[in-house]
Amino acid sequence: MRALTVRPGQPSTAEVTELPDPVPAAGELLIEGVALGICGTDKEILSGKYGSAPPGRDRLVLGHESLGRVHSAPPASGFAPGDLVVGVVRRPDPVPCPACGVGEFDMCRNGQYTERGIKERDGYGAALWTVDVPYALRLDAALADVGMLIEPTSVVAKAWEQVQRVGQRSVFQPQRALITGAGPIGLLAALLGVQRGLEVHVVDVVTDGPKPAAVVALGATYHHDQVADVVKRLRPDVIIEATGVGQVAFDVISHMAPYGIACLTGVSSGGHRINLDAGVINREIVLDNNVVIGSVNANLRHYAAAAQALASADLDWLRALITRRVPLARFDEALTVQPGDIKTVLTLNG
């Protein structure tokens, strides 16, 4: 079978590799790979900045935004050939820590978790892959074109869940949300905000093209002003930060509404210095009962919430998020950003 592999820690080592077909172990599904979403984490691994191969190996099968169809399934597994599925990314650590021990492996305390296509486990970027039944999620057949969006949607489903949990420390009646960044995470965060009945605003630097159009089609409001100005003007109850830009993160933290909640989902690259008045930020957070939280990854219930959210969404809107589909053999084209890109997808069976 063909698979997209890389030597983690070594840039420019990605290639389509011929590997033996996987043989499912007891309790595993054998899946025919359909498509794979490409995200910033993949690009960091491909540039040698991140990732680790399975123990005893020097190459890692890339890919965590999966979509496939069941080829074979164990008896009484609840799955059947032809079912549309995605695979969960993270696996709990073997100790386990208190969080992993109760299924909250997205909140692992000791860092010994593993992740498909990222950390010590082969990913889903292959013509065939296997997955343990408990870590597979069946999708509605209507999501056949967009099912690879489940994983990024699970990330924002967790972010919104965390916001809700923090808000419930007192009376929580949010009305207005601001999403910073109109990439896939930002747009999917906006989708879930709209589905919650909130007045949703999205800010990004581009002035035209598919990103502003996607926001408008969602029924939200698009802005391309300076983030600090937008936050000051809107005074949102909830902010989902999806850019990972340090200055943007501090702009939203510095200008939240009283009792506001800012959830940071973007990962900053570091090495960028910014000037800020830490005393003023501290004063505002304390006096306004504001909260800043970080959120990453997702567990099983977040994947289920993501599937429900996408099944309830407008399919044409979801399809518009996938701006390019590239065959696996031309994977390098998928890694080069093109004007107007939102989500690029590799097709695995062509």
Image (cartoon, rainbow, N blue to C red):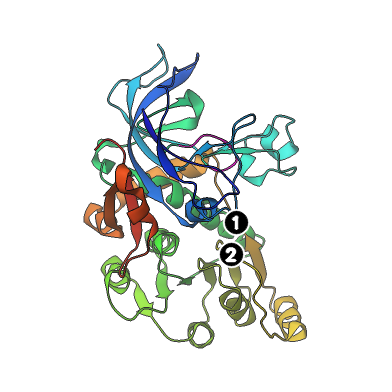
Q: Residue furthest left?
A: 316
| Magenta span | 118-123
> Residue drawn 40% across and 46% down?
150
Q: Which residue is mark 2?
A: 264
Q: Are marks 1 and 2 in contact (CB under 8 Å)?
A: yes
> Residue drawn 30% across and 28% down?
83
* Vertical side of 258 occupied by 343: above or below: above
Q: Which percent across, then down, holds residue 164?
A: 56, 58
Magenta stretch holds residue 196: no
Q: Which percent across, then down, holds residue 180?
A: 48, 72
Residue 295 badge: 1
Comparing 317 with 14, the one in front is 14
Q: Residues within 10 Å of mark 1 (few under 14, many from 20)?
A: many
What is the quadrant of the N terminus in the image?
Answer: top left
Q: Which percent across, then down, holds residue 277?
A: 73, 86
Q: Residues within 10 Å of mark 2 (few under 14, many from 20)?
A: many
Give the image quarter of residue 304.
Answer: top left
| Residue 53 visible in rendering | yes
* Vertical side of 275 occupied by 348: above or below: above
Residue kind at label 2, given as amino acid type: Leu
- Nearer-N-terminus badge (1/2): 2
